[in-house]
Image (cartoon, rainbow, N blue to C red):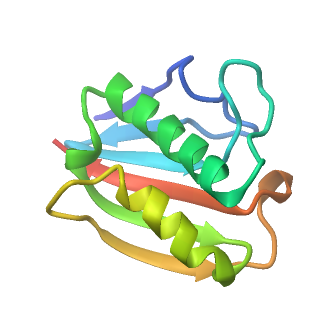
Amino acid sequence: MKSVINTKNAPAPIGPYSQAVMVNGLLYVSGQIAISPANGNMTMNNIESETKQVMDNLKAILIEAGMDFSHVIKTTIFLKDMNNFKSVNETYGSYFTHDFPARETVEVSRLPKDVNVEISVVAAI
């Protein structure tokens, strides 16, 4: 059974997709970028603040689904510039305490709204 998860505490989708979908105890969270749900503006002062907004958006969706970062089993990080890896990794890592999820990080030529980072997660109950 499929259940769509949406919260006003994360930005509304900018296309024909859901913030997240729950199926058989697995939560698939769509890639998040640094859009502030409060005002719809981009948070792009620096890579750290951009990554923090992305992670806060993911956190809001996880909470709506009754989860937190301890439930995350897999993440995918898309970077516009791999030179930002260290800074993104430090901010990203601050949201996890132990039993880190599996992950891949890839550099891509372009992301929606010309952001520098996009992150998606899969979580399990």
Q: Is residue 29 above or below residue 56?
A: below
Q: Is residue 87 above or below residue 19?
A: below
**Outermost residue, right direction?**
114
- Foreground of the two, 59 or 5: 59
- Foreground of the two, 17 or 68: 68
* Residue 74: percent from left, percent from top: 32, 63
* Residue 2: percent from left, percent from top: 35, 35
Q: Which residue occupies 40% across, 48% down?
A: 28
Q: Which residue occupies 71% across, 37% down?
A: 35
Task: Give the quarter of the figure containing the C terminus.
Answer: top left
- Foreground of the two, 84 or 4: 84
Answer with the quarter of the image where residue 43 lies.
Answer: top right
Q: Which residue occupies 73% across, 55% down?
A: 46
* Residue 91: percent from left, percent from top: 47, 57
Left-right relation of 34 to 109: left
* Residue 72: percent from left, percent from top: 27, 52
Left-right relation of 104 to 9: left
- Foreground of the two, 56 or 113: 56
Task: Give the quarter of the figure containing the N terminus.
Answer: top left
